[in-house]
């Protein structure tokens, strides 16, 4: 397996075709993943994320905290956890000022952060619970950002959603599980003080997306659920 800096073309294609969000995050830097057969598997992207103040929780300066914003992969990679680990090492080399990386597992997508648990990230909290993120229009979830480009009034309002579908309802998120990864070892005590028990144990089913031997190696309390 090898990784190289991703082109804009690769980023666009992978985000639109391999990731459930079907959107391209802005201000990103990332890597294309190739398996041992030299087949392209998608991209892993880092960026500033949606929040301009992600550094404040950790008392760090802007630019010292970055978010892992996408793992848009097609499943041809031998090991997702290995791909992530390589990308973290490369990112640290290419961005020495960054001290901490955060990422989120989307509970609405039934994600709990298994890949982060397998690669020894710290779990710190559940966040963004019961936040309105969009609407159910004609039976389909529509993100509120999309309301700016559809509908008669082109406004992000519930009234606009109703003008498209009179039975439209507001959609509230179940939240996200927040994880952090240390690049600067001086921050380990802080991360340990913030860390909580992982929200879910790794199961045999989860191992379809990661390498089982790596999971066992990196989790001393690893047990397969019956």
Image (cartoon, grey):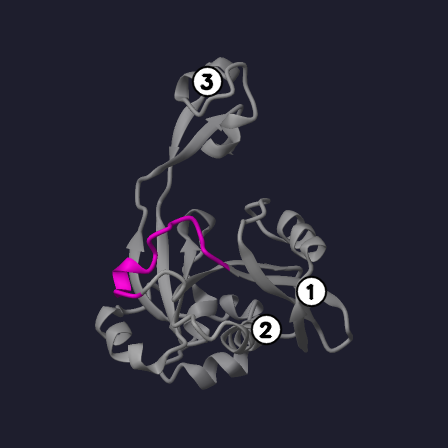
- Tell which of 159 and 216 is nearer to you: 159
Q: Are marks 1 and 2 in contact (CB under 8 Å)?
A: yes
Q: Which residue shows up at 30% across the image and 81% down it?
A: 186
Residue 138 percent coordinates (x, y): 53, 23
Q: Which residues are magenta?
A: 47-60
Residue of label 3: 160
CA gap, disc 3 and disc 2: 42 Å
Q: Main secondary structure of the magenta part?
A: loop
**Looking at this rendering, what residue extends furthest in the left direction?**
193
Q: Which residue shows up at 58% across the image and 47% down it?
A: 24
Residue of label 2: 83
Residue 179 percent coordinates (x, y): 37, 64
- Tell which of 180 and 48 is nearer to you: 48
Crowdedness of circle 1 by 10 Å Cα count: few (<14), some, many (20+)?
many
CA gap, disc 1 and disc 2: 10 Å
- Asked if 71 appears above or below 173 in the picture, the reply is below
Sequence order check, earlier mark of 1 and 2: 1
Residue 143 percent coordinates (x, y): 48, 35
Crowdedness of circle 3 by 10 Å Cα count: few (<14), some, many (20+)?
some
């Amino acid at each position: 397996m090898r990784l190289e800096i991703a082109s804009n073309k690769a980023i666009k294609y992978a985000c639109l075709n391999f990731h459930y969000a079907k959107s391209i995050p802005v201000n990103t830097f990332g890597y294309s993943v190739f398996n041992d057969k030299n087949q392209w598997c998608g991209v892993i992207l880092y960026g500033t994320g949606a929040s301009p103040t992600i550094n404040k929780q950790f008392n760090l300066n802007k630019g010292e905290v970055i978010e892992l914003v996408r793992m848009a992969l097609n499943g041809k990679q031998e090991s997702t956890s290995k791909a992530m680990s390589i990308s973290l090492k490369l990112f640290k080399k290419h961005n020495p000022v960054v001290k901490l990386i955060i990422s989120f597992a989307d509970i609405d997508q039934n994600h709990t952060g298994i890949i982060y648990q397998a690669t020894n990230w710290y779990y710190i909290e559940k966040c963004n619970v019961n936040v309105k993120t969009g609407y159910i229009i004609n039976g389909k979830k529509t993100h509120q950002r999309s309301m700016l480009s559809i509908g008669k009034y082109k406004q992000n309002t519930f009234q606009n959603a109703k003008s498209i579908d009179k039975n439209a309802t507001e959609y509230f998120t179940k939240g996200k599980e927040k994880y952090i990864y240390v690049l600067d070892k001086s921050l380990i005590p802080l991360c340990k003080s913030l860390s909580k028990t992982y929200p879910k144990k790794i199961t045999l089913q989860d191992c379809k997306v990661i390498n089982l031997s790596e999971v066992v190696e990196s989790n001393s309390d690893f047990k397969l659920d019956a």
